[in-house]
Image (tube, helix red, strand yellow):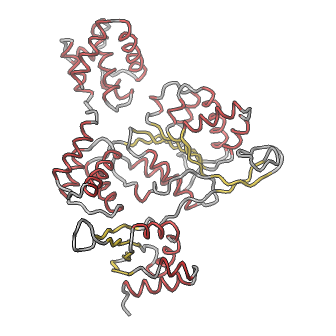
Amino acid sequence: MSVTANSVWNNCLAFIKDNIQPQAFKTWFEPIKPVKLSENALSIQVPSKFFYEWLEEHYVKLLKVALTKELGETAKLVYIIRMENTYGNREPFTEKIPSANRGNMGPQEMDVPIKSKNPELRNPFVIPGIRNIKIESQLNPNYNFDNFLEGDSNRLARSAGMAVANKPGGTSFNPLLVFGGVGLGKTHLAHAIGVEIKDKYPDRTVLYISAEKFTQQYIESVKKNTRNDFIHFYQLIDVLIIDDVQFLSGKSGTQDVFFHIFNHLHQNGKQVILTSDKAPVDMQDIEQRLLSRFKWGLSAELQSPDYETRISILKNKLYRDGVEMPEDIIDYVAKHIKTNIRELEGAIISLIAQSSFNKKEVTLELAQQVVEKFVKNTKREVSIDYIQKVVSDYFEMDVATLQSKTRKRHIVQARQLAMFFAKKFTKASLASIGSQIGKRDHATVLHACKTVDNLAETDKQFRKYIEDLTKKLS
């Protein structure tokens, strides 16, 4: 007997019927029509977007089990949403959306010692008596490895993340520090590792928290005189994910408490995952003992995606949103928005919104209008070589003189300005800037930036140099 969409769906229905209430089956499964079976993907037609959202939220696991029984582990489900009467078209409008195959993250249970019998106690810790509490992982299940596409720009970070997810606390990548510029996927990758760990090891306690929230909690614990309780709570976590760890800069109390938590987790084979917009060497006002610990494991950089990766990201986004778009428009967006993934996805969302709200067809002209708004607002990144040339020309010297070892005041100032603008206008690390501008180290670049800031406040002529060069480079 040949396998058809109808036969597969009827078998799935028989299984589903045995596992849910008759009324729920009548309401949510009887109206569904099987449409086609392509390889291992079954397409089913549902009457509305709400219907699809309800199935994804409440019955996705049941659907997955039923389909896997029929089509094996690689089974996929695609919803075809049929919406009548759009903009007076005679044909009903259809939208194809793949199933995420993923429910919401459930709360995690944890046994913790308690202070009193007060049932309202929110943060119970190490004192006599044990109580079972539920803590939310704070993970977003939509940020997973399935939609974190691999490219040359993120291969190391993604591979390390997968290794950590397969064996949390058991690899040499502890801590795993993911760093990179704005909108390149640091938070997405951090969530993806946590989500993957919860899938593979449901009994592990995973907690995602931003460094800012961590700091607020710590300040609150100091006010309430529960600092030790705060430390003990975090020492019970199996996988701790801290986002934007650079926000700990200058906060000595929070750094101190994090130092003790980190040591305990590391020594007990627990996994620590950190994200930052700077490499450890470029972090300022972070205690040396903490920085050295950040370097214990692996520091993996996320860079701007190349053209092929940008195309893949756009196609994946459109596929997941159930939208089809001409190749030339995808190509145009990918070629013109290069710096960050968040802006890339934002441009596509704007295009879809413009098209649906203004009832316009997605054309190249519309894409140009949308992209122009994004590109205008994006600061054009200039190269360090270009900055050196502009500064050298401004001070009427050649680049070799600018990079030389001479200590003549006007040449030193020109060199410091070049370093200052390289830090301001590029995403290069301090070490990289120093090596390109006369083979200096990162400490020299840091000193140069501070000197320029100080002179800008005290020296009127020097302030004019900065203003003139800013205009030339902007």
Q: Residue at x 65, y 52 (%)?
A: 135
Q: Residue at x 35, y 25 (%)?
A: 423
The quarter of the displayed image where residue 2 is located = bottom left
Place of residue 266 in the rendered image (x, y in percent of width and height, measured from the top left): 63, 43
Position of 216 with respect to 345 (left or right) is right
Q: Residue at x 48, y 32 (%)?
A: 280
Position of 330 with respect to 57 (left or right) is left
The quarter of the displayed image where residue 42 is located = bottom left
> Dividing the image into 4 quarters, which one contains the C terminus?
top left
Place of residue 6 in the rendered image (x, y in percent of width and height, measured from the top left): 38, 86
Position of 280 with respect to 384 (left or right) is right
Q: Is residue 378 visible?
A: yes
> Dividing the image into 4 quarters, which one contains the N terminus?
bottom left
Up-down relation of residue 169 to residue 470 (above or below): below
296, 196: nearer the viewer: 196
Up-down relation of residue 40 to residue 134 (above or below): below
Given the current orientation, which residue lies at the most extreme left position? Answer: 365
